[in-house]
Amino acid sequence: MHDRPGGHGAVPPDGLVAVPPRGALRDAVLRLAPHPQQEEFSGRADQTLPLAERDPARHPYALVEDGEPVAFLVLDETPTEPDPDADLLLRGFFVDAAAQGRGVATRAVAALPDVVRRDFPTAETVVLTVNVRNPAARAVYLRGGWVDLGELYLGGSAGPQHVMRLHLGAAGRLPGAD
């Protein structure tokens, strides 16, 4: 295990930064929510952030653009299902309803490998599940380098979910990235 992540780093060219939600940022994150029809897939931050704060293996992140939180996710160091061999599980990722349609999800998925390299330098794989009724999210993950493992996770409350994995390679490097 390692210390709870919290590095900030430089603001990337796309302006989207992943940071732990603390202080006033935490309060703003608690007000984030996806569109109501998307909540069954990801939950809302006011549901998932308190759970993450109580579990030292779960690391919540606010995705901040121009000083405002626009998305939320949790990286969990204890994936059990659907892929116990993965190093991290991406949980509860969503873009706030007011920020949708601006490419935030695509940019967040593209930035995730850098967040993992920064805060979990020994991680080689990240796994997630995405509901079969959420093809737009699945497409974003595929474009971001995730691989659909061709199996369904049936243990979720919202129905069958595709199991997807992001391979970072040794020491958190994307394969072929030098």
Image (cartoon, rainbow, N blue to C red):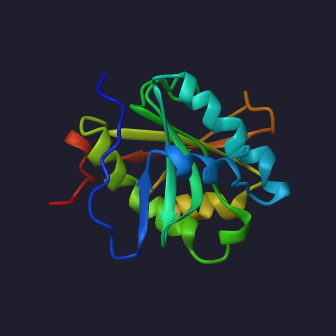
Residue 20: quarter of image: top left
The quarter of the picture where the C terminus appears is bottom left
Point 25% across, 53% down: residue:
175
**In the depicted structure, whether residue 107 falls above or below residue 9:** below
Residue 66 place in picture, x, y as percent: 48, 73
Task: Name the foreground residue: 176 vs 46.
Answer: 46
Task: Name the foreground residue: 83 vs 38.
Answer: 38
Q: Is residue 111 left or right of residue 53?
A: left
The quarter of the picture where the N terminus appears is top left
Residue found at the far right of this picture? 37
Point 67% across, 45% down: residue:
45
**In the depicted structure, whether residue 22 falls above or below residue 37:** above
Point 57% across, 74% down: residue:
103
Point 25% across, 35% down: residue:
122
Residue 55 place in picture, x, y as percent: 53, 22
Residue 71 place in picture, x, y as percent: 59, 58
Residue 49 place in picture, x, y as percent: 61, 37
